[in-house]
Image (tube, rainbow, N blue to C red):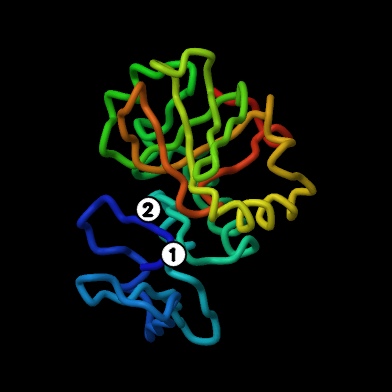
């Protein structure tokens, strides 16, 4: 399914109750295994709902932005936030969420998909790469990167919040992605939806 990951192998509850299931391609390209990402719509009588949103709302999935638009991602993010607030499903122990001020704990989750919250210390860039620094010690603190070719998409995404890249310095952010380790923990952003500004919503943990 597009833009969600379901950590559990349990059969999703909404499927058992639906009368019809419709799948719509989220992207024209298939991956190297021939799989096609899709949006799954469930129809129960006259009511149609997005399966991705249902799974997020019941705490059975995590939001993994790859294909959807900004508006779509806002809806999915809200569904996930609702489950997290209620500590449903995968959020019962909150083991996927970490604070940027604890880089050693983040590094311990290398190879896993996590959510990290914290205040951005500084931005940096080279010709090919952009950097978000969540600490002053680049050898140990969290660093978030993305390739410069993603700049236009990042700027467009941030414009929906009335912001630009330069406005991120000092902001409380939520970053989601797979943790890597190279001079401390890092996450590489592949889609603008992996970066979310928290300032007007709640303080980072």
Instruction: State the residue in front, 55 or 197.
Output: 197
Q: From what the image shows, is residue 112 above or below residue 76?
A: above
User: What residue is shown at x 47% (from left), y 13% (from top)?
Assistant: 137
Q: Looking at the image, tell me whether mark 2 or mark 1 is earlier in sequence order.
A: 1
| Residue 176 picture location, percent across and down | 45, 41
Q: Residues within 10 Å of mark 2 (few under 14, many from 20)?
A: many
180 sits left or right of 58 in the view: left
User: What residue is shown at x 66% (from left), y 55% (from top)?
Assistant: 157
Q: Quadrant of residue 34?
A: bottom left
| Name of the residue lying farthest toward the top | 137
In terms of secondary structure, where does tag 1 sit? helix
Q: Residues within 10 Å of mark 1 (few under 14, many from 20)?
A: many
| Residue 74 picture location, percent across and down | 61, 56
Q: From what the image shows, is residue 35 above or below residue 20?
A: above
In terms of secondary structure, where does tag 2 sit? loop
> Gap between marks 2 and 1, in whole Å?
8 Å
Q: Could you tell me which quadrant the N terminus lies in?
A: bottom left
- How many numbered dots are placed on residues in this image? 2
| Name of the residue lying farthest toward the front | 127
| Residue 145 picture location, percent across and down | 48, 39
30 sits left or right of 53 in the view: left
| Residue 11 picture location, percent across and down | 24, 63
Q: From what the image shows, is residue 42 above or below residue 99?
A: below
Instruction: State the residue in front, 83 or 176.
Output: 176
Q: Could you tell me which quadrant the C terminus lies in?
A: top right
Q: Which mark is residue 19?
A: none
User: What residue is shown at x 36% (from left), y 22% (from top)?
Assistant: 184
User: What residue is shown at x 61% (from left), y 58% (from top)?
Assistant: 153
The residue at which mark 2 appears reads as 61
Instruction: State the residue in front, 3 or 155.
Output: 155
The residue at which mark 1 appears reads as 52
- The reply to whether discs 2 and 1 touch (Cβ–Cβ < 8 Å) is yes
């Amino acid at each position: 399914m597009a833009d969600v990951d379901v950590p559990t192998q349990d059969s999703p509850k909404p499927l058992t109750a639906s009368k019809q299931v419709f799948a719509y391609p989220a992207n024209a390209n298939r991956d190297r295994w021939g799989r096609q990402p899709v949006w799954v719509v469930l129809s129960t009588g006259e009511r149609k709902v997005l399966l991705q949103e249902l799974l997020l709302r019941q705490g059975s999935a995590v939001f993994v932005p790859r294909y959807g638009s900004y508006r779509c991602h806002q809806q999915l993010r809200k569904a996930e936030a609702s489950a997290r607030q209620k500590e449903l499903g995968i959020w019962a122990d909150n083991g996927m969420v970490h604070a940027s001020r604890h880089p050693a704990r983040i590094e311990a989750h290398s190879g896993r998909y996590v959510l990290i919250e914290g205040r951005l210390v500084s931005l940096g860039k080279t010709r090919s790469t952009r950097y978000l620094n969540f600490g002053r010690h680049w050898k140990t603190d969290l660093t978030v990167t993305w390739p410069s070719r993603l700049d236009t998409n990042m700027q467009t995404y941030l414009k929906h919040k009335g912001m630009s890249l330069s406005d991120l310095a000092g902001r409380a952010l939520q970053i989601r992605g797979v943790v890597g380790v190279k001079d401390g923990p890092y996450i590489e952003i592949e889609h603008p939806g992996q970066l979310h500004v928290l300032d007007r919503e709640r303080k980072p943990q």
